[in-house]
Image: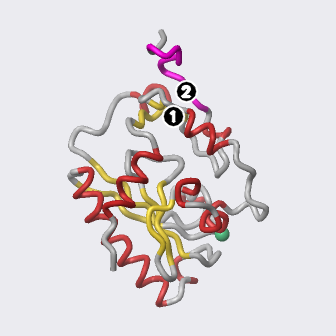
Amino acid sequence: MRDYDGTEFGDVEDAAAFAAAPDAFQRLWTPYRIAYIKANSEQEPASDDCPFCAAPAMEDEQSLIVHRGVHAYVLLNLFPYNSGHLLVCPYRHVATYDEATPEEVAEIGSLTQVAMRVLTETAQCHGFNIGMNQGRIAGAGVAEHLHQHIVPRWALDSNFVPIIAGTKAVPRLLGEVREELANAWPTP
Ligand SMILES: [Zn+2]
């Protein structure tokens, strides 16, 4: 089945083809406008192989950064569990929470609060999953660079696809969501 412009419905991309650390899911990009994602996946991998060290050196549109703080920054997850799935990372390449400085801990906390408010305002979500996977054994995709997940949740956001096909439907494109969140982020 094809869209009016000839693109095929239901393209499924293997997460292993993306630039950052893959996870177990394939993703069905439901808007069928995958050119943006393909453009991102064709970037050169970072020389040190750490996507969270490489991101701040790129333009916000390219790295999906929503907000840059003093010690930490906020970006959209390239492998989202849901639309608006954000990550808060310290700029410093540290692996675990106990290695973060008090300043980094404080800013990761305050950026998480602002992210919740911005997501509530822009996406009208009903709840959040917030947390850090510490170490690969605990599920961290990029275990060597600390990052806090902020996953917005809606009452009816679960669907059968992850259960039967290992595929998550992500209804909005990352570039579109990044722009909306960056515009809604309060200026200090
Ligand atoms: Zn790093």
Between residue 14 and residue 188, name the one nearer to us: 188
**Gap between marks 2 and 1, in whole Å?**
6 Å
Residue 113 locus on image (x, y percent): 31, 72
Image height of 167 relative to 118, above or below: above
Image height of 30 relative to 111, above or below: above
**Quarter residue 117 falls in:** bottom left
- The label on residue 27 is 1
Left or right: where 46 falls relative to 122: right
Residue 93 covered by magenta stretch: no
What amino acid is labelled 1 in the image?
Arg
What amino acid is labelled 2 in the image?
Val
Residue 10 covered by magenta stretch: yes
Q: Residue at x 55, y 34 (%)?
A: 26
- The label on residue 116 is none
Q: Residue at x 66, y 40 (%)?
A: 16
Between residue 160 and residue 69, name the one nearer to us: 69
* Category of crowding for the residue at label 2, using alpha-carbon neighbours closer than 10 angstroms: few (below 14), some (14–19), many (at least 20): some
Q: Which residues are magenta?
A: 4-13
- Mark 1 Cβ inside 8 Å of ligand 1: no
Magenta part, dominant SS: loop
Judged from the image, the quadrant occupied by ligand 1 is bottom right
Residue 108 locus on image (x, y percent): 43, 76
Task: Look at mark 2 in the image and give the residue it sits on.
Answer: 12
Q: Kindly indicate whether the residue at mark 1 contacts the one at mark 2 (C-beta within 8 angstroms).
A: yes
- Mark 2 Cβ inside 8 Å of ligand 1: no
**Quarter residue 41 falls in:** top right
